[in-house]
Image: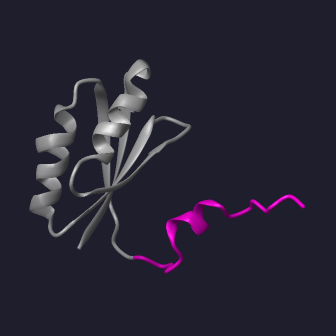
Amino acid sequence: MVTAFVLLSVERNKIEEIAQQLSDMKGVSEVYSVSGSYDLIAIARVINNEKLADLVTGRMLKIEGIIRSETMLAFRTFSKHDLGSMFSVGFEDEV
């Protein structure tokens, strides 16, 4: 299994539309809108690098409104916690 993080700069008025298109793609497990240099991060989980290439260059980057992308491959997983708990670090429920 190959896991990749695809960082995307997109046209501002198309963020939600593009996020929805990405989240509907086979091989994309999550899509996040983020702050910083990029607008969206798509997490791809596919069987091999060929499927990743097809997903990113063959399908994702053909979406109108994507300006630029950067893909990062995950080498190892160091935590077995689910993503929800990882992204909630530092937040406590108010009493």
Q: Is residue 53 left or right of residue 91?
A: left
Q: Is residue 73 magenta?
A: no
For the point 29% across and 43% down, the residue is 22
Region in magenta: 77-95
The answer to whether 41 is drawn above or below residue 10 in the figure is: below
The answer to whether residue 36 is left or right of residue 10 is right
**Which quadrant would the N terminus be assigned to in this image?**
bottom left
**Furthest-top residue in this view:** 13
Residue farthest toward the right in the current orientation of the protein = 95
The residue nearer to you, when weighing 73 against 27, is 27
Please name the colour scheme applied to the rendered image. one colour
Q: Is residue 75 above or below residue 64?
A: below
> Where does the image place residue 87, in percent across and percent down from the top left?
59, 60
**Residue in the picture at 51% in, 78% down:** 79
Name above or below for residue 2 compared with residue 94. Answer: below
Give left or right: position of 30 versus 66.
right
How many numbered discs sit on the rendered protein? 0
Q: Is residue 80 magenta?
A: yes
When the figure is inspected, residue 71 is found, relative to residue 66, above or below; the finding is below
Q: Position of residue 20 (x, y in %)?
A: 35, 38
Please provide percent x and percent y for residue 17.
Answer: 35, 29
Q: Quadrant of residue 60?
A: top left
Residue positioned 42% across, 19% down in the render: 13
Q: Quadrant of the C terminus?
A: bottom right
Spot occupied by residue 27 in the image (x, y as percentages of width and height): 23, 58
Q: Residue at x 65, y 61 (%)?
A: 88
Which secondary structure is most common in the magenta stretch?
loop
